[in-house]
Amino acid sequence: MPHSWRTEAQWLLAILLPAALLGYLKNLLWPTLTAVLLLALLWQLWQMHRLQRLLLQDTPTPPAPPGGLWESLFRTTQRLQQRSLRHRQQLQALLSRIQDSTDALQEGILMLDSHGNLEWWNLAASRQLGLKRPADTGQPLTNLVREPQFSAYLKQADFREPLIMAAPHASKRQLQISITAFGRHERLLVIQDVTRLRQLEQMRKDFVANVSHELRTPLTVLSGYIETLQDLSAELPPRWQRILQQMSEQSGRMDVLIKDLLMLSRLETTRQEPPQWLDLNALLEQILRDARALAASKHQQVELQADAPLQILGYPGELRSAFSNLAFNACKYTPDGGHIVLSWQVLDNGCGVFAVQDNGMGIEAQHIPRLTERFYRADPSRSKATGGTGLGLAIVKHVLLRHDATLEITSTPGTGSCFRCVFPASRWQTGKQLTGPDQQGYQP
């Protein structure tokens, strides 16, 4: 028997034996024992009440009764309460430090529960979204930020790409919102003010557009004089003919470069007009003829695999530029006698895919993620030899973005490459007739 129980039994015997002796002498044995037991029960109930009060209060103030089981229970409970209080104080201090550190961040941070209600946010998020503490705690975030694009972004399940939108209370400020899902459908939002970056990006676009536009006039004048001198090359010394030939080639490269820069600028800055339903078969047939004409000098075989009549919703000039870039690149970078396939196929999810497959030299894996960057070349010497500007795939990327499509690139060095333009199901359809007042076929 534990010591506390033995002490409690000894205490009970110590009060019962004198009471029994006194009752026996007074001939009141049972009434005396009953009274003593009732008093002992009342004392036990009082100690239980004190223990309950001790468990319910925050600080262990009541003194422990001397000796016995109750003293052990009281002292154990007090030690546990003191330990719990120390842990709570440490956790509170840690939470205060975390809150102070997040309040010092320039980025806004919000935590949403599984229902999209606000649980916690820092000071930067309050400034960026106009939130108020603690009045907005527990409120649905979509009720406080009434932006349709934000509500649509919050409801979707794919948060791989951040959302860029105007600040709710300052339309000139641009915010980038990234969402990370965690726990049980809870979400963590990180908000960055990208106004300065957007302004710099716009300045860069304007600079490229203005410089490209301003270079066209002097380049046109120079090209004109070079062509005039070439017409008179028979009257010039032989060494001048080689100089004029090099000048003509370089001015032609500059002209192509400026045209590509101007097209990129137009894709980035111009607003989209309503798209049209185009005859995709006619567009692909025209690109096939142009690709075969380019491949003839290298004895390459170019074929098209798209039998069913197809229609695509988009912009004819832009799609022709994107598809031509891919087809012509395959011709340029595939060795003599190579095989190139242009194809259209439908995936199981309904997406339509225009693909260009070649059996050329291929591309190293480390270059593939950067191929769509401006002026990036996997092999600079090879691009110069073929007259490339390093802007073709950047143009393809921007055209596909304007058509809700993506570019997928796979390649194996020494085997070949495949460039796939993946269009959503809403962007294409089958059928022989193009119907509707705003739908027309492609005219090459």
Image: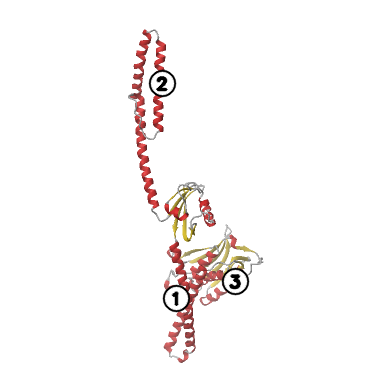
Q: How far apart are marks 3 and 2 (CA)?
A: 102 Å
Crowding near the residue tagged with mark 2, few <14, some 14–19, many ≥20 C-alpha atoms within 10 Å: few
Mark 1 against mark 2, which lies toward the viewer?
A: 2
**Residue at image location 35% in from the left, 35% down from the top:** 82
Crowding near the residue tagged with mark 1, few <14, some 14–19, many ≥20 C-alpha atoms within 10 Å: few
Mark 2 lies on a secondary structure that is helix
**Residue at image location 43% in from the left, 85% down from the top:** 243
- Above-or-below relation of 416 to 177: below
- Above-or-below relation of 309 to 259: above
Using the rendered view, name the quadrant where residue 367 is placed: bottom left
Mark 3: amino acid:
Glu
Report if residue 253 is visible in the image. no
Q: Where does label 1 land, which residue? A: 385
Q: Where does label 2 land, which residue? A: 42
Q: Distance between the residues labelled 1 and 2?
A: 104 Å
Mark 2: amino acid:
Leu
Q: In which quarter of the image is the C terminus?
A: bottom right
Q: Distance between the residues labelled 1 and 3?
A: 28 Å
Q: Where does label 3 land, which residue? A: 285
